[in-house]
Image (cartoon, rainbow, N blue to C red):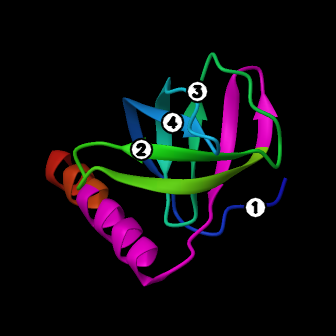
Amino acid sequence: MSERRKAERYPVDKDYYFYPANRSKVYTCKVRNVSASGACIISKKHLTPHEIIFLHITGTRGVQFKSEVVWAQDGLYGLSFVLEDSEDLDNISFVMNTVSKKINASS
């Protein structure tokens, strides 16, 4: 199988939350890993491919990322970040730097 990922993924394995595009309710999830282009989450809330959600990653400036569900399998979901402006790019850069520093510090 060929590698489909656009960017290196870093393990996170922490609880966070997301909400749907209409912001009607908040759902908990576990972020398994994250990259500059997306994330993999575990959620009890059923999501479907092409659905838009906002993933909130606390502890990193409290940023949220507009994300598209690109695949779903038994409660596991692949997300692609929809980065729309320079602030989004700045936020994902901050998250990736924070995550990589934590990983390198524990090595």
- Amino acid type of the residue tagged 4 in the rendering: Phe
- Residue positioned most to the top: 44
The range drawn in magenta is 71-98
How crowded pointer 2 is (Cα within 10 Å; few <14, some 14-19, many 20+) is rated as some
Q: Earlier in the sequence, mark 3 or mark 4?
A: 4
Q: Taking 102 as reference, is 66 left or right?
A: right
Between circles 3 and 2, the one closer to the viewer is: 2
How crowded pointer 1 is (Cα within 10 Å; few <14, some 14-19, many 20+) is rated as few
Residue 28 percent coordinates (x, y) = 47, 23
Instruction: Give the CA distance from mark 1 to mark 4.
Output: 24 Å
Q: Residue at 54% across / 26% down in the picture?
A: 25
- Amino acid type of the residue tagged 1 in the rendering: Arg
- Identify the residue position indicated by label 2 in the image: 56
Between circles 1 and 2, the one closer to the viewer is: 2
- Amino acid type of the residue tagged 3 in the rendering: Ile
Label disc, if present, on residue 34 of the rendered structure = none
- Identify the residue position indicated by label 4 in the image: 18
Q: Earlier in the sequence, mark 3 or mark 1?
A: 1
Q: Classify residue 49 by image quadrant.
A: top right
Secondary structure under tag 3 reads: strand
- Identify the residue position indicated by label 3 in the image: 42
How crowded pointer 3 is (Cα within 10 Å; few <14, some 14-19, many 20+) is rated as many
Q: Are marks 2 and 4 in contact (CB under 8 Å)?
A: yes
Between circles 1 and 4, the one closer to the viewer is: 4
Between circles 3 and 1, the one closer to the viewer is: 3
Secondary structure under tag 2 reads: strand
